[in-house]
Image (tube, rainbow, N blue to C red):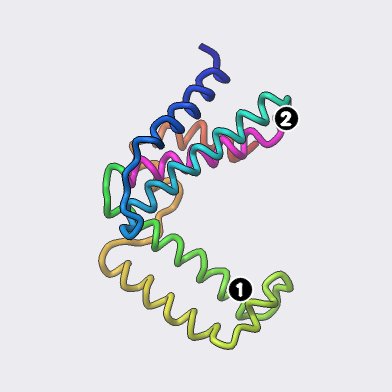
Amino acid sequence: MGELDLLKKLHDDLIRFSAMLNFDKTHSWHRNMVALHGSLIELSGALLMLLNGGRQIAVPSIFRTILETYVEFYNLLKDKTYGYHMEAQYIYQWLELLKEAANGTNPYLESIAKLPDLSQRISEMEKELTNLKVKGYSPLKVCERFERAGMLNEYASLYNMLSAD
């Protein structure tokens, strides 16, 4: 079986498994698992369309995203509290963006910089992030995510090749 056949099987299996999903939309673990599952379907489908259409330049970038998504999915499946690390990463990334907007020098963030409660939002998010860190849930570097998934070899080879591409 070739790589394209394996990708098609993965995509088809993901869709088939979707029919078996039962989840509580009010539960963050369930929402995260379903969102990551959906991302894997969309990304593998996009990859198939590109490859079948002879469009290959974006393949490494999309495959790298699939790999990152799989790592998050696996870590969350293995440890339900992993979602707190995901939340810490989400807050951290938005804090970086909001702080960049607050310094007023980035024209792409001009509309955010004009928010009347921007400093209050930043302060609240900093508290949220601090609370998560105190509980042991900090944002994780990509390498740390792969390590938790037992995929350091993949990180040190495949992921780095895809990132360099």
| Between 23 and 93, the one nearer to me in the picture | 23
Image coordinates for residue 30, horizontal then vertical, percent: 33, 51
Image coordinates for residue 93, horizontal then vertical, percent: 51, 64
Q: Is 29 colored magenta in this rendering?
A: no
Residue in view at x 73 percent, y 25 percent: 54
Up-down relation of residue 30 to residue 160 (above or below): below
| Between 38 and 20, the one nearer to me in the picture | 20
Q: Is 61 colored magenta in this rendering?
A: yes
| Quarter of the figure that contains the C terminus | top right
Q: Are there few (<14), some (14-19), or many (20+) residues within 10 Å of tag 1?
A: some
Q: Are there few (<14), some (14-19), or many (20+) residues within 10 Å of tag 2?
A: few
Give the residue type at disc 2. Answer: Arg
Q: Tell me: 126 left or right of 159.
A: left
Q: Which residues are magenta?
A: 55-76
Q: Which residue is mark 1?
A: 100
| Between 59 and 99, the one nearer to me in the picture | 59
Q: Tell me: 94 left or right of 24.
A: right
Image coordinates for residue 136, horizontal then vertical, percent: 27, 62
| Between 155 and 131, the one nearer to me in the picture | 131
Residue in view at x 37 percent, y 73 percent: 128
Q: Which residue is mark 2?
A: 55
Give the residue type at disc 1. Answer: Glu
Q: Given the current orientation, which residue lies at the most extreme bottom position?
A: 116
Residue in view at x 42 percent, y 32 percent: 153
Residue in view at x 61 percent, y 83 percent: 115
Task: Answer whether labels 1 and 2 touch (C-beta < 8 Å).
Answer: no
